[in-house]
Image: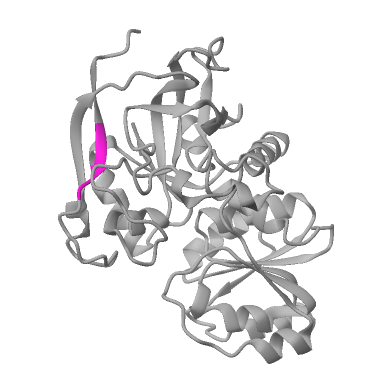
C-alpha cells in the first residue's frame, strides 16, 4: 500500500492558556489537522501508527502546566506511547531492511543505557516541548526511538507499554526483587498495573491500593495478592502493617507524591525503599527526616525510563505472556480519552486507535 501524501494528526494548540490541567476548557487545546505526510531523513523511519496510548503527563503537556519541566510549544503532536509499522526509511537507517516491521516507540531516545542517568534529557522526550509524539497517523522518528513490538500483543496492547512498562521495570530496580518479598502499588494506572504483573512474575507478594472495588478486582486479576480500598480505608498504611504482621513492605511504588508519601514511608519496613514515580498534586513541605533516618529507609526518585528498560519490559512481557488492561477509543474520540484520563475513571491504559 502506497503512503498517502497527506494524513491526519492531533496537535496541541494553546487556546486555553491557564496552565491548569483541570480546566473545564482544557480540551480546547487538542485539535485535529490534515498535514503533509512527513518524509524520513538520514537515520530516520516513517511509521504508520495503528494505536497511541495516553499517560497522565499528557494532561500537563496539553495544559502547558508549570508543573511539567518544559514548556509546550504550540503545534506539537502529543502522546509518547505508540505502536505501528515501518513503511519507509531514510538514507543510512539501520531499519532499511525492516519495512513492514511492527514497532513501538522509545519515550526518550536520548537515554539508551538504563545505568547512565546522565544520558536523560527531558528535551528529547516524545510528545512534549517541541518533539512530536504518537497521536498521528504517520510520524517520522530517529532510529534509536523505536524497538520491535512484543509478538504476543496486539497493536492496541502494545501502545500501552512504552512509558508505563519501562517505568515499572525501572521502579522495581530500586531493590533486587526476590521471591517472597512484598511490594505495594498505588492505584491501577499503567505503571502500577505493570508493577503488579512484573513483581508477581518475579515471585513477589503484591499489595495494591485503589479508590474503587472495581479497579481492585482488576488488580487481583493481574496478580495482586491483597487489595486495599483507600476510600473506605483512608489510613491504608495501618492496613498494610496488619497484612504484613507489623513488618511493612520491602518496596512501595509511590505515584501520588505529596498526598501519599507519609503513608508510603509508614508502610515500608525497616530498611525498606520507596520508589517515587510521580505526583498527582503539587509538592508540599513535609517533615519526613525522622521517619527516614530512624527507619533506615530509602527514597529513590525514578526519572523516566531508558531504551534498555523498555527492551527488558518487552522481554518480560513475551516470556510471561503478559497483557495490559486497556480501554480503547476511536480516532475521532481522542478528546473523550483525554477527558477520561483527566477524571481518572478507568483502570489501566487509555488507547486511541489510529
Instruction: Give x and y (percent) for residue 204.
Output: 77, 59
Q: Is residue 231 left or right of residue 264?
A: left
The stretch in magenta equals 9-13
Query: Does the magenta portion include 225?
Result: no
Of residues 184 and 291, which is closer to you in this image?
Answer: 291
For the point 34% across and 54% down, the residue is 61
The residue positioned farthest toward the right in the image shown: 179
- In the rendered image, is residue 175 in sight? yes
The colouring scheme, among rainbow, by chain, secondary structure or one colour, is one colour
Query: Does the magenta portion include 11?
Result: yes
Of residues 99 and 247, which is closer to you in this image?
Answer: 99
Q: Quadrant of the C terminus?
A: top left
**In this rendering, is residue 160 above or below 152?**
below
User: What secondary structure is the magenta-colored segment mainly?
Assistant: strand
**In this rendering, is residue 226 above or below 46?**
below
Q: Is residue 125 left or right of residue 333?
A: right
Of residues 245 and 140, which is closer to you in this image?
Answer: 140
For the point 50% across and 86% down, the residue is 285
Amino acid at each position: 500500500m502506497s503512503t498517502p501524501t497527506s494524513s491526519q494528526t492531533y496537535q496541541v494548540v494553546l487556546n486555553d492558556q491557564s496552565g491548569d490541567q483541570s480546566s473545564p476548557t482544557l480540551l480546547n487545546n487538542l485539535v485535529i489537522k490534515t498535514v503533509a505526510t512527513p518524509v524520513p531523513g538520514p537515520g530516520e523511519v516513517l511509521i504508520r501508527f495503528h494505536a497511541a496510548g495516553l499517560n497522565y503527563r499528557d494532561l500537563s503537556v496539553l495544559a502547558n502546566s508549570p508543573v511539567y519541566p518544559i514548556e509546550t510549544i504550540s503545534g506539537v503532536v502529543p502522546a509518547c506511547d505508540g505502536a505501528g509499522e515501518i513503511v519507509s526509511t531514510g538514507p543510512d537507517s539501520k531499519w532499511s531492511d525492516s519495512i513492514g516491521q511492527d514497532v513501538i516507540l522509545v519515550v526518550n531516545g536520548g537515554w539508551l543505557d538504563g545505568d547512565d542517568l546522565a544520558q536523560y534529557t527531558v528535551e528529547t522526550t516524545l510528545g512534549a516541548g517541541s518533539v512530536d509524539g504518537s497521536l498521528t497517523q504517520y510520524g517520522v522518528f530517529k532510529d534509536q526511538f523505536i524497538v520491535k513490538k512484543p509478538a504476543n500483543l496486539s497493536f492496541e496492547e502494545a501502545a500501552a507499554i512504552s512509558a508505563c512498562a519501562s517505568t515499572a521495570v525501572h521502579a522495581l530496580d530500586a531493590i533486587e526483587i526476590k521471591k517472597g518479598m512484598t511490594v505495594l502499588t498505588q492505584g491501577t494506572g499503567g505503571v502500577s498495573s505493570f508493577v503488579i504483573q512484573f513483581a508477581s512474575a518475579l515471585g513477589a507478594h503484591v499489595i495494591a491500593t485503589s479508590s474503587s472495588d472495581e479497579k481492585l478486582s482488576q488488580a487481583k486479576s493481574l496478580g495482586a495478592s491483597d487489595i486495599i480500598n483507600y476510600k473506605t480505608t483512608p489510613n491504608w498504611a495501618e492496613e498494610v502493617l496488619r497484612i504484613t504482621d507489623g513488618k511493612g513492605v520491602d518496596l512501595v511504588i509511590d505515584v501520588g507524591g505529596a498526598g501519599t508519601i507519609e503513608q508510603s514511608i509508614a508502610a515500608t519496613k525497616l530498611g525498606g525503599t520507596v520508589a517515587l514515580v510521580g505526583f498527582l498534586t503539587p509538592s508540599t513541605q513535609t517533615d519526613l527526616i525522622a521517619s527516614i533516618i530512624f527507619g533506615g529507609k530509602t527514597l529513590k526518585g525514578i526519572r523516566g525510563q531508558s531504551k534498555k528498560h523498555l527492551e527488558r519490559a518487552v522481554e518480560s512481557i513475551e516470556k510471561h505472556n503478559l497483557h495490559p488492561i486497556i480501554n480503547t477509543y476511536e480516532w475521532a474520540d481522542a478528546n473523550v480519552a483525554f477527558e477520561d484520563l483527566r477524571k481518572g475513571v478507568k483502570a489501566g491504559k487509555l488507547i486511541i486507535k489510529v
